[in-house]
Structures are given as C-alpha cells and as structure tokens.
DNA sequence: TTAAACTTTCAGAAAGTATTGAAAGTTAAA
DNA sequence: TTTAACTTTCAATACTTTCTGAAAGTTTAA
C-alpha cells in the first residue's frame, strides 16, 4: 500500500470511529492527521489536507484544545499558529477518559443520586430505587476504576491488564 | 421527589447519555422506561409514555432487540407483542460491550492492520507505522480485556476492580 | 498610527438524523 | 375466506448538526 492511501484510510477510519462515539468527524480527522504528522501544522495545512473550510478547521482545533489533546505551538519569528498532538497513545486514552468522565459520567451520577431521593414505598417505587441504585453502584465502580486509570502511569495499566488475564 | 418526576428525569438522562455516546435518544429513553418498569410493555404503552409515534417506537425497539438488550415477550392468548429488558446491570454492560466491540472496535482494528502494510522507509512512513502500530497494540490490549469482561461472571468483575484498586 | 497577517465568529446553507403518519403487510380468529 | 388486530415500512417532513465563507476582530511589524 502507498503512504498516501494508507494515510487517507487511517484519517477516514479515525473520523468514522469518532462519529460512532459522538465526536465530530472533522475533529477526529484533524486529530488523525496531527497524529501521523511529526511536525506541527498550520490551520491552512489542515484545511488543504482535509479539504475543509477555515471556520471548520478553526472550530474543531479549538475543541481539540478544549479536550486537552491538541496543543498550540508558537514558532519564534512566525505569526502563524501551529498545532500538534501528543503521540503517546496511553496519555491520549487518559485524557479522553478524563474528559468523558467529566462531561458525561458526572452528570449521570448526579441524576442517579437525585432520583434516589424518591418518596413512597409502592412496589413500583421500590423497583425504581433498586434499578437506579444498581446503576449508581455500577457507575461508581467504573468511575473509580477510570479515576485510577487517569492518575496511573504506564506500568500500572499493563499490570492491571496482566492481572485481568490470569 | 415524586415518582413521576424521578421517572421522567431518569428517562431524559438516559436518553441524553445515549446521544452523547452516539445512540439514538429515543432508543435510550425506551430502554430507560423498560428498565424501571417491571412488567413488559406494548408498543402503545411506550408511544404513550414517551409521546412518540408508532414508527419511531417500532424502529427503536427493533434496534434494541438487534443490540440484544430488549426481548419480545409473547403473552398466551394475546396478539400484541410485549417488550421487556433484563434488569441485571452487569449483564447489560456486557451486552453493550459485546456490540460496540463488534460494531466499532473490530472495523478499526481491521484498518489499523491494513495500513501497517505500507511500503517505503522514509521517516514519514516510519512514523506512520510507529503511531498506527502503537494504536493497534493499545486497541488489542483493550479488546482483549473487553473480551475477558464479556465472558466473565459477576465475581470476576469485582475481583478485577479490587485488584485495580490496590 | 497604519497596514498586513493572521484568527475568530457567525448567519445562512447544506448535510445528516430522527420522527411522523398513513399505507402496506402479516397473522390469527371468526 | 374475510375481517380485525396488530406490525412494519417508507416517503415526506421536521429537527439537529456541521460546514462554509466572508466580515469582524486581534496582533504585530513597519
């Protein structure tokens, strides 16, 4: 396979994966492009490579920076902003976990706790408490594990995987 | 809090969580409704409770059945179809993991493997191989862990969580 | 200052998704 | 059979998200 074809396939796949998990396709594609490019790129480079508009590129670069997975690089003597992303996959996974935890797990936990404060003792209410309680318990466990992962180093992750396997 | 309010809040939250993870909102809401309802419900019950059309209800019930998390219940002597969902949260998590693995992780792994077959030995190509290789390695690890989880029983899950924590 | 180089914003357009409702299809009792 | 009860499909529409391009904003150098 040729480099250009492989590159394109990877960028498309990363965009599609993003979409399936609720992340803007262009955001995924920009990230993919930065991942496979060693040097930092300008907005124009990205516009040209991905055939997207300036507004689109700018907006998604901001989002990627909000997520903490793309950094701005300023080159001495240059006005233009360059962008790059860390190439450490574990660190990327940690950052994504951190953000999704904050954005999606936390709000759900808040609701689960709130609805537990329900009045009454009909079977209906009991069942509701049971289900949301189970959900809350499970979510807390996952959240705790995620937190551990986020704070962890490389060794910890592989050690856990080893432990899981045996 | 009153039951009706809690119920509504939970249903909305579940729908919103679904959206954030690329799952149709109505699909999430139907699942939430079935979760907190002990008895199986008909399409009409669901239409009425969630104020959605027959087509919408039917379509999303089919999707939930495709995902393997909602079951059809046939009541003797009745023509109508009833629907219900398992109330075991761990089992739900396993089923969702199974499906997302099949639908999203597998295609990405296929692409990552394909693009590794790239020709050339320029620094560009080397870097591409490095990054996609890392990604592939990480994905395989996660996939393996997920597979283990999917096949696991309740005990295994909690044991792993305990191991992670220490 | 002014002007040039660059970034951000945002209204409107396009594309993508979800939803409706009614017609077509299916099934089982009469 | 026929009919009634029910489910599925699907074209049309509504809604949401994404994208564009140009105008407005900002920063730096002259």
Image (tube, coloured by chain):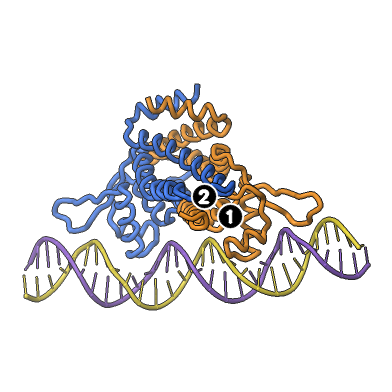
Chain colours: A orange, B blue, C purple, D yellow
Residue C12 location, x and y as percent? 61, 76
* Secondary structure found at label 1: helix
Q: Which residue sits at x=58%, y=38%?
A: A91
Q: Quadrant of residue A165?
A: top left
Q: Which residue sits at x=44%, y=56%?
A: B25
- Please indicate whether residue B84 sits to the left or right of residue B142 in the image: left
Tell me which chain the residue with mark 2 is part of: B
Tell me which chain the residue with mark 1 is part of: A
- Please indicate whether residue B144 sits to the left or right of residue C29 in the image: right
Residue B125 location, x and y as percent? 54, 48
Decide: is A121 above or below A22. Answer: above
Decide: is B4 above or below A152. Answer: below
**Residue at numbered disc 1:** A30
Decide: is A123 above or below B30. Answer: above
Q: Nearer the viewer, residue A97 or B136?
A: B136
Q: Nearer the viewer, residue D12 or B153?
A: B153
Q: Nearer the viewer, residue C12 or A8?
A: A8
Q: Nearer the viewer, residue B136 or B63?
A: B136
The Cα atoms of the two marked residues, 2 and 1, are separated by 24 Å
Q: Are marks 2 and 1 on the same chain?
A: no
Residue A159 location, x and y as percent? 48, 25
Residue A33 location, x and y as percent? 57, 53
* Residue B35 in view here: yes
- Marks 1 and 2: in contact by CB < 8 Å? no
What is the number of the mark on residue B120?
2
* Secondary structure found at label 2: loop
């Amino acid at each position: 396979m040729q480099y250009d074809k492989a590159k394109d396939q990877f960028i498309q796949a990363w965009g599609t994966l993003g979409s399936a998990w609720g992340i803007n396709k262009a955001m995924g594609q920009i990230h993919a492009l930065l991942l496979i490019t060693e040097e930092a790129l300008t907005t124009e480079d990205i516009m040209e490579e991905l055939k997207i508009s300036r507004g689109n590129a700018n907006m998604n670069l901001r989002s990627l920076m909000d997520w903490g997975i793309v950094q701005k690089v300023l080159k001495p003597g240059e006005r233009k902003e360059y962008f790059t992303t860390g190439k450490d996959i574990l660190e990327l996974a940690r950052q994504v976990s951190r953000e999704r935890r904050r954005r999606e797990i936390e709000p759900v936990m808040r609701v689960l706790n709130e609805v537990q404060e329900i009045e009454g003792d009909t079977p209906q209410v009991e069942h509701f408490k049971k289900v949301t309680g189970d959900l809350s318990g499970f979510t807390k466990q996952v959240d705790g594990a995620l937190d551990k992962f986020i704070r962890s180093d490389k060794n910890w992750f592989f050690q856990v995987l080893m432990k899981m396997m045996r």
